[in-house]
Amino acid sequence: MKILRRYWGLVVLLVLVVAWWTGNAGPEMLYLLSAGVVIWSLLQAPAWCGAATRKSGTFCRNNSHGLLLGCHIREHQWQKFKLLFYSHRWAEFSRGTWATPSAKLATVSGMVGTVSAIATGIKDFALG
Ligand SMILES: [Zn+2]
């Protein structure tokens, strides 16, 4: 199933939410699910490349996998990678990555996964 291969991260996200909701899952399980969601959003989620092109105000609309990686153009991959290290460029980075609904979904999923991992760490530390 093609759609499942592209959106498996959302299935993991759903399982993660249910795991938190029911409180039955151990910390190892929560870490694993959180990591899965974050990895999906950064490296696998369907999104636009979003790298700024030479024409001012436009960005690359080639398909890319995940929010972190650019499209097949090597220059764009490098450009996106560099953007992460200049905080004043994050607006530029997010403008491109937030361009499509699926990218928004991936960004939110990634944030939920990150928060979940941190919360698991706190909970694990407090109880253990
Ligand atoms: Zn590109």
Image (spheres, rainbow, N blue to C red):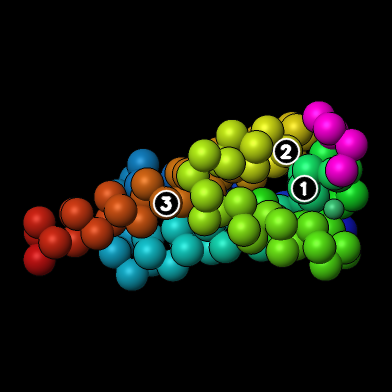
| Residue linked to disc 2 | 96
Q: Amino acid at mark 1?
A: Ala
Q: Earlier in the sequence, mark 1 or mark 2?
A: 1
Q: What is the spatial separation of the Cα atoms under label 3 and label 2, in whole angstroms?
A: 21 Å
Q: What is the spatial separation of the Cα atoms under label 1 and label 2, in whole angstroms?
A: 7 Å
Quarter in which the N terminus is drawn: bottom right
Q: What segment is highlighted magenta in the picture?
A: 54-58
Residue shown at 62% from the left, 58% from the top: 82
Residue shown at 29% from the left, 64% from the top: 27
Quarter location, residue 78: bottom right
**Residue 124 relative to residue 51: left or right:** left
For the residues labelled 3 and 1, say whether their Cβ atoms are less than 8 Å apart.
no
For the residues labelled 1 and 2, say whether their Cβ atoms are less than 8 Å apart.
yes
| Residue linked to disc 1 | 51
Q: From what the image shows, is residue 98 above or below residue 111?
A: above
State the residue in front, 126 or 69.
69
Q: Amino acid at mark 3?
A: Thr
Quarter location, residue 96: top right
Residue shown at 61% from the left, 51% from the top: 83
Secondary element under disc 2, as helix, strand or loop, is: helix
Residue shown at 36% from the left, 42% from the top: 21
What is the x, y in percent for residue 123? 19, 54
| Residue linked to disc 3 | 114
Secondary element under disc 3, as helix, strand or loop, is: helix
Quarter in which the C terminus is drawn: bottom left
- Crowding around mark 1 (Cα neighbors within 10 Å: few <14, some 14 to 19, many 20+) is many
Q: What is the spatial separation of the Cα atoms under label 3 and label 1, in whole angstroms?
A: 24 Å
